Image (cartoon, rainbow, N blue to C red):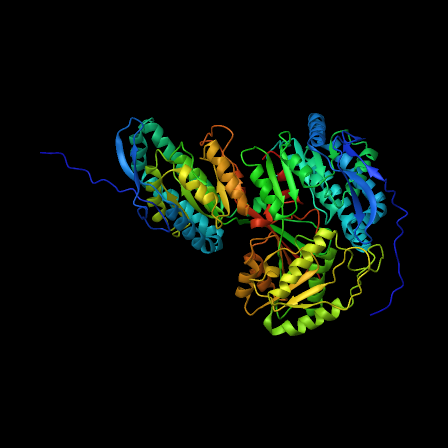
Amino acid sequence: MFEYAPAPESRDIVDIRPSYGLFINGEWVEPQSEERHKTVNPATEEVLAEVAWAGEADVDRAVQAAAKAFPVWSALPGAERAKYLFRIARIIQERSRELAVLETLDNGKPIRESRDVDLPLVAAHFFYYAGWADKLAYAGFGPDPRPLGVAGQVIPWNFPLLMLAWKIAPALACGNTVVLKPAETTPLTALAFADICRQADLPPGVVNIVTGAGATGAALVNHPGVDKVAFTGSTEVGRLIARGLAGTRKKLTLELGGKAANIVFEDAPLDQAVEGIVNGIFFNQGHVCCAGSRLLVQESIADELLEALKRRLGTLRLGDPLDKNTDIGAINSAEQLAKIRELSEAGEAEGAERWSPPCPIPDRGYWFPPTVFTGVAQSHRIAREEIFGPVLSVLTFRTPAEAVEKANNTPYGLSAGVWTEKGSLMLWMASRLRAGVVWSNTFNRFDPASPFGGYKESGYGREGGRHGLEAYLAV
Amino acid sequence: MSERLAVRKTYKLFIGGAFPRSESGRSYVVTSSKGDFLANAARASRKDARDAVAAARKAFPGWSGATAYNRGQILYRIAEMLEGRRAQFVAEITAFGGVGAKQAGDMVDATVDRLVWYAGWSDKIGAVVGSANPVAGPYFNLSSPEPTGVVAVVAPQEGPLLGLVSVIAPVIVTGNTCVVIACERAPLPAITLAEVLATSDLPGGVVNILTGSPAEIAPWLAGHMDVNAVDLTGADPELAVTCEELAAENLKRVLRPPAGPVNWLADPGLERMTAFLETKTVWHPIGV
C-alpha cells in the first residue's frame, strides 16, 4: 500500500453559526420549543452548532406558512416554478464545495464522496425536476395534473442534502409547498439550503425547514394540515407512519430499509466484481439503504473472490473524512456505532467468522473498520437485519435458482446486484429478483432520471424520473 | 300436471380453482332486496381466507410469469364466457331486485366490455408506464412495471357484477393474483362469475372468491403477512381504517376506498392497474 501525505480539504470555506433557529415563511425564527441540541462532527466529536428541536407549535407554524404559500405557488405558471428550481440548481453548483465540506463535517462521510457523488447529484436532481415543472401535462398523469398541497417530508442522515433534493425538487416542480425535517444528527446542510432558498428569492413559505428528532417528525407527518407525507428512513418508523396515516386522505411514499443481495456468478469479471462489492457495501460506510450487504457468491469461485476482496480491503484508507485520500469515513453517530457493534457481535455469537483488515482507528470520533463475515447462514441476524454499516455478510450458492431463492429470502426489496458476463442469465436474474433497482455489473449508481424505490417492506412509491412525479400529484 | 320443480344451485366459495364449502360449515341467508329467500351462501372463515391466500401465492409465479399476450387472451376468454351466460346474470341481478331486466342487461354488457378493455392492456401497460431512462453516464437503464403479488380485494358493496369485475380485472391483467371478498348482500353473481372464471383457462388460484362478511374477513387478509396489497374499495370507513392499520405491519400497498360514489360505467383510467404495480429499474454498463 502506498503511503500518502495527508491532503485535507480546508474547512475555512464553511461558516457555521453557533446556533440555528427554524426556517419558516422565508425567515429564521426562534422556536417556541426550548429544546436545543448540539450537532457534532462524528469524526472528532467536536460540537459544530446548536440546533432547535421543534415542538408541535413550531411544526404547526411551519405547516401554516406552507399552506398559506400553496395557493400562490401552485398557481404560478410551471415555467416560473421551473426557473426558481433552475436557480436553486445553479446556486448549489456555485456553492458545491462549501456544501460538500459542510456535509462531510456534519455527517462524517469522506470528502471524496460528498464532493464527487452527493453534491453533483443534488444539483442534477434540481436541474432535472426544474424541467418537469412546465411539462406536467405530458407526464402521463392526465392533461392537467394537480399538486396535493403541503408536503411533510422527513429525511435520514446518510445522504442529508441529497435526500433533501430528492424530496424538495419534485414537490416544488409539481406545485406543492413543503415542510422538511432533516435528521437530528445532520441538520446543517438543510439549514444551509434555507439560505439558498433566500438567495434564489424563493417566495416565503414554499420551503420551510424544521429541525428536530423523532417527535418533531411525528408532529409533522400527523399534522392535519399536511396533505402528503414522504419519508426516507427505517422500516420500523415507516410502519408507524403508515399506521398513523390510516383513515386520512394523506398520500404517502416511503423509502425504507434494505438487505440487498449482491450476486456474483463464476463467469463474472472478478476484478470488476470486487470493486462493485466494495462500492456496494463500503461506500458511505455502508450507511446506504440499498447497500449490497449480502454477498452471494457462486461456490466455485468463493475462495478466489474472497481472497481478492480481502486483498482489496487491505488498501482502503479509514480516517479523516476531510482528507481527499480517505475511503472510509466516520460512523455518523455513537448510537449507530453501538448498533453496528451489537449486530457484529451477534454475527460472531451465531457462529459466523469475522474478518477485518489491519486498520488503525482514530482515538476520537465514531469508527468501525470494514468487516467481512464468512460462513453466514440465512438464519443469522447479520443476514436478515439491516446493519447500516461497513459490514458484509458472505453466503454462497450453486445454481441461479438457489441465488434467486436466497436473494429474495428477505422482507426487504430495495435493490440487488448481479455480476455475470452472460446477458441472458443477467436478464433472467433481473426479472426474478424482487427488488426495485437491479444493478448488473455495477452497483450503487444513482441518477435523477432513474426511478428509485423498493418492493415489499422497503416501502412504496418511486423517487426520480417521470415516476417520481406521481408522489406529488393528485393522481 | 304440476310445474317442474327447479334444480337450485349451491353457492360455494371459489378457492384455488375449486368450489369448496366453507371449512367452518357456516352459511348465511341471501335475500332479495324485498326480503325473499334467494339462497344460502357460504360464510367464509379465517381458515378459508388463509387457504385462499395460499392458493393465490401458489398461482403467482405461473401467472406473473405468463406472457402478457397469454394473460390478455385469457381475460378476453373470460369476456367470451361471460357473454355466453348473459341471461343467467340478468336473472340473478333482477332476482335480487332494484333493477329491471333492461338495466341489468346493460350492466352485464358493460361488464363484458370492461373485460375486453382490460384484456387489451396486458401487453400495453408496460409501454405506457415503463421507461428507458436517459441517465448521465454510459449505462443502459430501463424501468418496467411488475405485479405486486397477492392482492386482497374488498369488492364494492354496490354493483355486484360490474363493480366486481371492475376491481378484479385490473389486478389480474398485470400478473397479480387475488383474494376477493364479494359484495355481502348480493354475493350470488360473484359465485356465478367464479363459474365463468373456472371455464376461461384462468389458472386456478389467480382469482379466489370468498363470500361472507367483509368486516370479518377483510382484517384477516389485511393483517396476513403473505398478502402484498389491499384494495379497500368496498370497505366502509371504519373497516377501511382497521384494514389500513393492519396493512402497515408488512407495508402492504393500500388502495383506499373512493372519496365518493363511483360511477362504474365511467372510463376507469390506469389507477387500478398502477396501484398494484411495482417499478423495477435495471442498470447495466455500456462498453466494449
Whether residue A170 can be seen here: yes
Q: Above or below — where is A69 with respect to A404?
A: above
Residue placed most toward the observer, A113 or A271:
A113
Residue B102 falls in image quadrant: top left
| Residue B219 position within the rendered picture, expressed as x and y whole percent measured from the top left | 45, 41
Whether residue A443 can be seen here: no
Question: On the picture, is B40 further left or further right than A341?
Answer: left
| Residue B261 position within the rendered picture, expressed as x and y whole percent measured from the top left | 47, 28
Image quadrant in which the C terminus of chain B is located: bottom right
Q: Above or below — where is B258 with respect to A452?
A: above
| Residue A117 position within the rendered picture, expressed as x and y whole percent measured from the top left | 77, 52
| Residue A97 position within the rendered picture, expressed as x and y whole percent measured from the top left | 85, 48
Residue B78 falls in image quadrant: top left
Residue, x 37% and y 47% (percent of image)?
B48
Image quadrant in which the N terminus of chain B is located: top left
How many marks on residues? 0
